[in-house]
Image: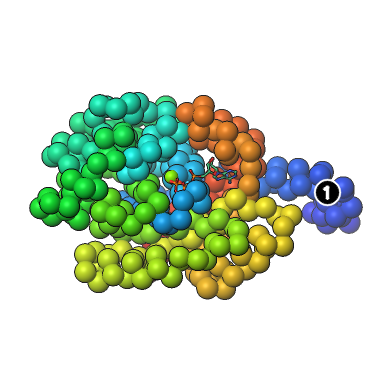
Amino acid sequence: MKQADQNNDDAVQAPPLLRELTDMTRRRMAAEAQVLPLPSKTRIFTISNQKGGVGKTTTVVNLASALAKYGARVLVIDLDPQGNASTALGVEHREGTPSVYDVIVGETPMEDVVQHSPEAEGLFCIPATIDLAGAEIELVSMVAREQRLSRALQEYLSEVDFDYVFVDCPPSLGLLTINAFVAATEVLIPIQCEYYALEGLSQLLKNIQLIEKHLNPKLKLSTIILTMYDQRTNLAHQVAADVREHFPKETLDTVIPRSVRISEAPSYGQSVITYDYGSSGSLAYLEAAVEIARRGVPR
Ligand SMILES: Nc1ncnc2c1ncn2[C@@H]1O[C@H](COP(=O)(O)OP(=O)(O)OP(=O)(O)O)[C@@H](O)[C@H]1O
Ligand SMILES: [Mg+2]
């Protein structure tokens, strides 16, 4: 018998836990062996879903950290007054800290508020503070109110190189989210594998189309990522199958499992990759990063 067949046979006969461990070891070795291509132009993602708590921030933080660990230069813009992405990336964002608020409502250049994240060498964050909570209202009467983030980002990118930019949005469609849509070239939607997952999605897609038509012709839904996947439930399988049927090209093969380690990491000001490198959640986000980098920009 050839060595490969022998290994295969071992895996089939092994008890489930051992099989899972063998599988994870194999996947981890594959993920670690990857050398990722860097994009020729900065890829700017907005992570959006007006549903709350579906894993937007978790996805931003962990994908950004994973890509940075693969050697990319990555910028995270926290556009949610809750400041969860800033917390998880271990950057200062107490009230009064120079932040994305000063960039959007004031005219402070991004380079004056950007902070390095201790997560990885090439990872930077523009933090959000609670000051941003008033920005939705302040923006209403401002000139170019939909383009303020985009202009500031383009100015910054003309001086500093980044491979990826991720904008973490609040769970609502207000002027902050619209600013993110106008600044981005790609939309990434995290979908939680639960019963109401697809509800509200058609409205989100309509909004993306409206933005594309009126404010940003470059915007495209490029990526859907299934989050908080519990493989023991039929419901999760069903939701995943539905999403794949509707969005076969956009949906990543990688699914993010429901994992306690993923939810614990932010309270240590870390991504799950730094917090518990050997966990299944860390592996899944590394694999998702590989997929995004390998797929490249959709045509
Ligand atoms: N794969 C996962 N496994 C377990 N818990 C998770 C996972 N992904 C996210 N969570 C937890 O679920 C909660 C919501 O996640 P997250 O904050 O990323 O969602 P969100 O869409 O950004 O929320 P909001 O709409 O409030 O901004 C958090 O407590 C987070 O730690
Ligand atoms: Mg969030």
96 or 220: which is nearer to us?
96
- The image position of residue 245, as x and y in percent, is 57, 73
Q: Decide if residue 274 is on the left or right side of residue 64.
A: right
- The image position of residue 40, as x and y in percent, is 32, 54
Residue 184 in sight from this viewpoint: no
**Vertically, is 209 above or below 77?**
below
At 36% from the left and 54% from the top, the residue drawn is 172
- The image position of residue 141, as x and y in percent, is 12, 51
Residue 256 in sight from this viewpoint: yes
At 76% from the left and 47% from the top, the residue drawn is 20
Quarter holding the N terminus is bottom right
Please, what is the three-letter code of the amino acid marked with disc 1?
Pro
Pointer 1 local density, CA inside 10 Å: few below 14, some 14–19, many at least 20: few
At 32% from the left and 44% from the top, the residue drawn is 79
Quarter holding the C terminus is bottom left
Q: Decide if residue 215 is on the left or right side of residue 200.
A: left
User: In the rendered image, which residue does mark 1 sit on?
Assistant: 16
At 24% from the left and 41% from the top, the residue drawn is 134
**Vertically, is 194 above or below 162?**
below
- The image position of residue 168, as x and y in percent, is 38, 46
Find numbered disc 1 in the image and state the secondary structure of the residue it sits on: helix
